[in-house]
Amino acid sequence: AQSVAQPEDQVNVAEGNPLTVKCTYSVSGNPYLFWYVQYPNRGLQFLLKYITGDNLVKGSYGFEAEFNKSQTSFHLKKPSALVSDSALYFCAVSPLGGTYKYIFGTGTRLKVLA
Amino acid sequence: GAGVSQSPSNKVTEKGKDVELRCDPISGHTALYWYRQSLGQGLEFLIYFQGNSAPDKSGLPSDRFSAERTGGSVSTLTIQRTQQEDSAVYLCASSSNSGTEQYFGPGTRLTVT
């Protein structure tokens, strides 16, 4: 079965330190990969995506993600965390690319400590 | 421009009642999706509309759930004879025909008492 895993329910990081939120997937073919962020009582906001090309993609608010095909991973990163980055982060995969339904990871709560 | 809107933002209903949740996608977006976010199940796909094609209903959890999309725009998700396990946040998203990412609405929080 196709699946997306976010192995950490919560990640704590000190403000100013680099952060990583992990995502691995089990989907055949060449899926499209996405990261979304959710603030309390809000919908999901798009951060970035990988379709093809350079394995390091840059997105909103200084976030970036690294695609690793051999490890089927798409980890979210930021060089210097801000307290305002504290939120719930979701990795999503579109198995057939383009306009198609997502498979979501279970979410990782990021807490940035001042 | 305007994003995806959903109404109501909150809905409390008694077990056994029917509810309707509404989604207004971004103008011009051909694809529309419904997802459910609940504590025990995370984010799960429910149904997907693409243009005039038959919808992909593969994620609907039971025949109490149905959805329609009128005129290729507004969509309504209907839950009949609601159960307590239907309590969740229902999220709608839309995407353009040429786009790849989905844009999400703020969700409707459904509470079944």
Image: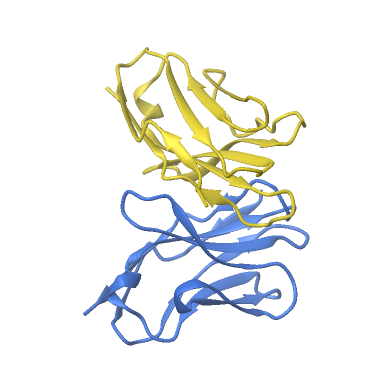
Chain colours: A blue, B yellow
Please tell me which residue lies in front, A89 or B69: B69
Where in the figure is residue A36, as x and y percent of width and height?
49, 60
Q: Quadrant of residue A31?
A: bottom right
Image quarter where the C terminus of chain B lies is top left
Question: Residue A25: where, in percent of width, then height?
Answer: 62, 62
Residue at x 52% of width, y 52% of height: B1
Quadrant position of residue B16: top left
The residue that appears at 44% across and 36% down in the rendered structure is B6
The x, y position of residue A37, in whole percent, is 44, 61
Considering only vertical position in the picture, is A106 above or below B48?
below
- Seen in the image, is B26 located left or right of residue B88? right
Task: Look at the image and tell me whether residue B3 can be seen.
Answer: yes
Q: Nearer the viewer, residue B11 or A111?
A: B11
Picture residue at 58% right of the left edge, 66% below the top: A24
- Does residue B85 appear to the left or right of A6 in the view shown? left
**Residue at the spot 42% in from the left edge and 50% down from the top edge:** A43
Q: Is residue B61 visible?
A: no
Q: What is the total number of numbered labels drawn onto the structure image?
A: 0
Q: Is residue A21 above or below residue A35?
A: below
